[in-house]
Image (cartoon, grey):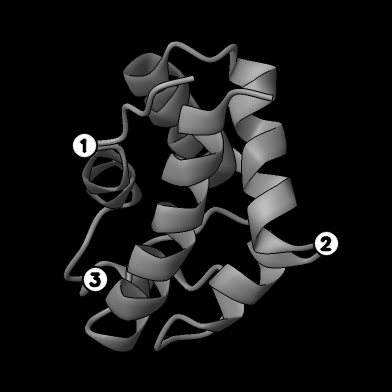
Amino acid sequence: MNTNALIAAARFHALAGTAAANGGFWVSAGGGTANVVAGEIARATGAAFDEALHALDVTGGEDWYSDLAYAQPWGWNDMDAAETARWDARIIAKAACRPVRVSA
């Protein structure tokens, strides 16, 4: 497991919780948001996409994605309400990856 991916994933979960409590961000019902976040983590850390997605599962727990969706200040998959979101999952993921390099 890529240590940098684990660190970034753990940081994403912490930042995402704060973002959800402070204006929220769109979480796709189909899992697309998880793919966007994993892609950003993979790009920033050099981990494979599947490894980054696994790091999100390991650090976020079994139901992290649905927990993330329900933490938003609107109903699940409510596109109209989500348009008022203050944050974007890609921005949160990028913030979670800076700086993330550690010695192995």
Q: Residue at x 65, y 75 (%)?
A: 67
Q: Position of residue 58 (x, y in %)?
A: 73, 49
Callout 1 touching callout 3 (CB < 8 Å): no
Question: Which residue is at the front of the view, 103 or 30?
Answer: 103
Residue 66 higher or lower than 34, as above or below: below
Name the one closer to the observer, 11 or 22.
11
Task: Read off the residue under disc 3.
Answer: 85
* Left-right relation of 25 to 62: left
Residue kind at label 3, given as amino acid type: Ala
For marks 3 and 2, give the one nearer the viewer: 2
Q: Earlier in the sequence, mark 3 or mark 2?
A: 2
> What residue is shown with label 1?
99
Q: Is residue 29 left or right of residue 94?
A: right
Point out residue 24 in the picture as x, y percentages from the top left corner.
31, 75
The three-letter amino acid code for the residue at tag 1 is Pro
Residue 8, quarter of the rendered image: top left
Mark-to-mark CA distance, 1 and 3? 26 Å
Question: Which quadrant, please, contains the N terminus?
Answer: top right
First of labels 2, 1 by sequence position? 2
Residue drawn at x 59%, y 81% is: 70
Precedes in sequence: disc 1 or disc 3: 3
Dot 2 corresponds to which residue?
62
Label 1, secondary structure: give it: loop
Percent x, y of residue 32: 56, 39
* Above or below, comparing residue 44 to residue 89 in the picture: above
- Amino acid carrying mark 2 in the image: Glu
